[in-house]
Image (cartoon, rainbow, N blue to C red):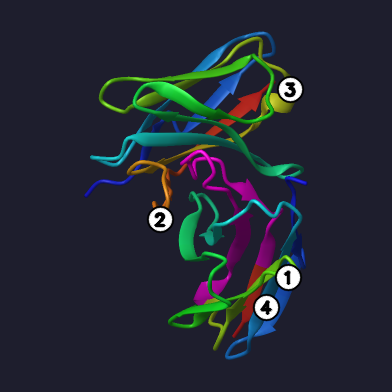
Amino acid sequence: QQQVKQSPQSLIVQKGGISIINCAYENTAFDYFPWYQQFPGKGPALLIAIRPDVSEKKEGRFTISFNKSAKQFSLHIMDSQPGDSATYFCAASSFYGGSQGNLIFGKGTKLSVKP
Amino acid sequence: KAGVTQTPRYLIKTRGQQVTLSCSPISGHRSVSWYQQTPGQGLQFLFEYFSETQRNKGNFPGRFSGRQFSNSRSEMNVSTLELGDSALYLCASSITGGIGNEQFFGPGTRLTVL
């Protein structure tokens, strides 16, 4: 019930295309859903995050779509660029008890954007 | 503003030894979380400290421990190292660890156990 399932494991997209990464969760207590981007040799960096009271959030070329009833959320990268090539992690946590310190991560998606 | 720093960046130890990793959070951040990253298990939460107190703990054996100092710097210790402890250990800091607080990750410490 604590798992976050992420797909696909790897993704190849042409420059200018749309990259879509999906995540599903079981724990209905989760109420914070961030996406992280990680480059080799670096720690993960927050891209965008959403709370379950909205169905979509957009920041630049990055959009999170959230479906509370299906317990799914996805990351869309519009106009994908070679510089977006990285590993992307979805995550979830519950603020119950007042802490987001415990993030449950998906297994990651390695995105390659071909020029 | 300086980011999260972790020392050392790389460590090689042998089975049975113990190791201590250090994390300095961003100035003003009082919450520090530790994660283990491996190719097989991905990113897994170890524990979180806030105001020198462990507030959350993941599902790791007691060989993994941590502490936080009054300046919010944190250390984690792994005793009796096993081959399976080889991983990238990441720490992340946030202002309070509460709602809306982004976690900022350091570059990690790469631990290799031989």
Q: Taking A66 as reference, is A88 above or below it?
A: above
Does label 4 lie on the same chain as label 3? no
Sequence-earlier tag: 2 or 3: 3
Circle 1 residue: A69
The amino acid beneath tag 1 is Ser
Indicate the chain on which mark 1 is placed: A
Circle 2 residue: B100
Does label 4 lie on the same chain as label 1? yes
Circle 3 residue: B83
Task: Tell me the residue at 77%/43% (across/down).
Answer: B40
Circle 4 residue: A20
> Gap between marks 2 and 4, in whole Å?
25 Å
What range is drawn magenta here? A83-110
Residue A40 falls in image quadrant: bottom right
The amino acid beneath tag 4 is Ile
Task: Tell me the residue at 57%/48% (across/down).
Answer: A94
